Image (cartoon, rainbow, N blue to C red):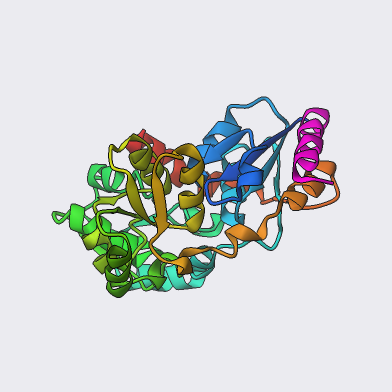
Amino acid sequence: MTIAQIQDEIRALKKERDICVLAHVYQAREIIEVADFTGDSYAVSVSAQKTANSRVVMCGVRFMAETVKLLSPEKTVYLANQEAGCPMADQLNAARLKAAAEKYPGHAVVCYMNTTAEIKAMSEVCVTSSSAVKIIRAMEEHDILFVPDCNLGAYIAKQIPEKTIRLINGGCPIHAAVGAGDVAAARRAHPGALLLVHPECVPDVVTAADYVGSSSGIYDYAVKSDSREFLIGTETSIAEHLQYACPDKRFYYLDKKMMCHNMKATTLMDLYHCCAGDGGEEITMPPELIASAGKCIDRMIELGG
């Protein structure tokens, strides 16, 4: 079968089995084309919450499918590829967070969206990369323990110097793989190109950027910009999608190391088999975990909209 034929089969299966397909922006183009909603992990979870579909398939990584289930506990939620995990989310377990909280007593725990439901259940509020500064600034608590990404945490702390923000060692190995030397090499190769980076990058890279924002923020900035050339400092899929969206512009990887193998683990055939009912993994969790983990997302909405 061709890619187009498989895509048509998936579209038919979606209608037949009442399925809504979500695709994170880091997914491959052939998956994006058959998804009902595409975006950052929280954005697509909210979109699924508003649909009437009884089944939801997440093309992304495990914590994203968990977030879908937290927001839509009445729906049957699947992860298209059961082996697609997130190294950052896996770095932090309950025991490590408990030890960090004991080290910094009296600190409000703020977790990044890129965490497991278990960690969300132990946190006061959850944030996304685009909402973190606004939400933490709005919190009445002065002392914050931010987990797990120390690079994103350092970026947030710089924006809110009036608060005390404690960090632990953790983060996205894909974004953390590039440094100032890689920026210098990329600028030499593409002089004049604007550098757009995700705040999960190390501080030296963030400081050198022309724009810092979430994956969706980077995408929107590049689409709307009058500039013609861009260095994209986040997962390589964003540069690829921008090439389709803006064929009159040029997009370059900040570095080829920024390819996430976990995000690339999900294939179009994984999605096909999941929609057909003989693949993927159903995401289940106890009602008490859904309730406790959902509280920090509720507070995120309360503080950030």
Residue 250: give x, y in percent of width and height: 40, 48
Residue 97: give x, y in percent of width and height: 44, 68
Quadrant showing the C terminus: top left
Q: Nearer the viewer, residue 141 or 117?
A: 117
Q: Nearer the viewer, residue 109 or 193?
A: 193
Residue at 30% x, 38% y: name it.
225
Q: Is residue 226 above or below residue 132?
A: above
Q: Is residue 215 magenta?
A: no
163 sits left or right of 243 in the view: left
Q: Is residue 14 visible?
A: yes
53 sits left or right of 296 in the view: right
Q: Is residue 168 above or below residue 152?
A: below
Q: For residue 168, which quarter of the picture?
A: bottom left
Which stretch appears magenta?
1-17
Residue at 61% x, 59% y: name it.
264
State the count of labels: 0
Q: Is residue 9 magenta?
A: yes
Q: Is residue 272 above or below residue 16?
A: below
Q: Is residue 145 visible?
A: no
Q: Residue furthest top?
A: 52
Residue at 70% x, 29% y: name it.
53
Residue 162: give x, y in percent of width and height: 13, 54
Residue 29: give x, y in percent of width and height: 60, 46
**Dominant secondary-structure state across the stretch colored magenta:** helix
Q: Is residue 121 above or below residue 184?
A: above
Q: Nearer the viewer, residue 69 or 23?
A: 23
Residue at 63% x, 27% y: name it.
51
